[in-house]
């Protein structure tokens, strides 16, 4: 199983990604997690992305694309992978097409979590209290939504046109949403 998970900030992508990956025995690859781990370890990459993430902006495409290309070339992706948080821009989507073509690993589907925007801010503020993520404050959250609307949401139309989009209602308890997702993905397993 090779898939992307998409959805607005706070839609529960990370939580569902972990459950889906465990179900199919594939790695869940989150660009946000990779960047956060580099910030924590104060690597060179971490120093580049720290301020960008704090502001809610996007890490430059070339940096992100290189990270994803390297990660997808790792042997643990042989049985498949779930990519979370990339592509976020049209340039990333095009680059990802090239990477997957070169690897000979086309996507089975693009899973989109559909959630009412009004619920998202509240969810993210709650997460901020629990996880203390540096980019979960009101101003950054607002910026991340704006970036999502402008740069990332248009990608859904691209995958829909290609007939690759699987949309799932992301409203509800974690296990309810997960059941919906696994039912939808059964068509591709
Ligand atoms: P969320 O899903 O809650 O928006 P992520 O963990 O996916 O959070 O991403 C956190 C931050 O990491 C983003 O706001 C952005 O700064 C950076 N980031 C993650 N993935 C990408 C990407 N594909 N391109 C550019 N920046 C990214």
Image (cartoon, helix red, strand yellow):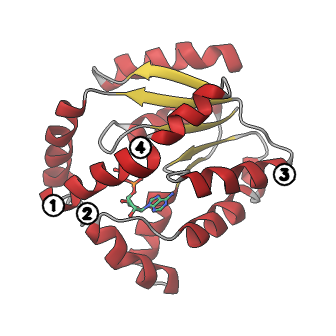
Cα–Cα gap, marks 3 and 4: 25 Å
Q: Secondary structure at mark 3?
A: helix
* Residue under numbered circle 3: 103
Residue 135's tag is: 2
Which residue sits at x=35%, y=24%?
A: 170
Q: Is residue 11 left or right of residue 85?
A: left
Residue 91's tag is: none
Which residue sits at x=62%, y=46%?
A: 27
Determine whether label 2 and label 1 are within 8 Å by CB.
no
* Residue under numbered circle 1: 139
- The quarter in which the C terminus is drawn is top right
Cα–Cα gap, marks 2 and 3: 33 Å
Residue neighbourhood size for the residue with mark 4, other residues' Cα within 10 Å, grouped as few (<14), some (14–19), many (≥20): some
Residue 177, visible in the rendered structure: yes
Q: Does 162 appear above or below 141?
A: above
Task: Name the spot of residue 187 as percent of width and height, x first.
Answer: 67, 13
Q: Earlier in the sequence, mark 4 or mark 2?
A: 4
For the residue pair 15 and 4, the one nearer the viewer reads as: 4
Whether disc 4's CB lies below 8 Å from ligand 1 is answered yes
Residue 14's tag is: 4
Task: Name the spot of residue 183 as percent of width and height, x first.
Answer: 54, 13
**Residue 75 quadrant:** bottom right
């Amino acid at each position: 199983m090779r898939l992307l998970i998409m959805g607005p900030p706070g839609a529960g992508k990370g939580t569902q990604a972990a459950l889906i990956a465990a179900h199919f025995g594939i790695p869940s690859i989150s660009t946000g997690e990779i960047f956060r781990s580099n910030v924590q370890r104060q690597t060179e990459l971490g120093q580049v992305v720290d301020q960008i993430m704090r502001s809610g902006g996007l890490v430059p495409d070339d940096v992100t694309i290189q990270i994803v290309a390297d990660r997808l070339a790792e042997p643990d992706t042989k049985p498949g992978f779930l990519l979370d948080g990339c592509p976020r821009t049209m340039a990333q989507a095009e680059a990802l097409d090239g990477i997957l073509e070169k690897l000979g690993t086309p996507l089975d589907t693009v899973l989109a979590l559909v959630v009412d925007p009004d619920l998202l801010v509240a969810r993210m503020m709650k997460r901020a209290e629990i996880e203390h993520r540096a980019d979960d404050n009101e101003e950054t959250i607002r910026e991340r939504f704006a970036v999502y609307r402008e740069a990332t949401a248009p990608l859904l139309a691209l995958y829909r046109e290609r007939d690759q989009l699987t949309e799932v209602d992301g409203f509800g308890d974690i296990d309810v949403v997960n059941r919906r997702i696994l039912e939808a993905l059964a068509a591709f397993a």
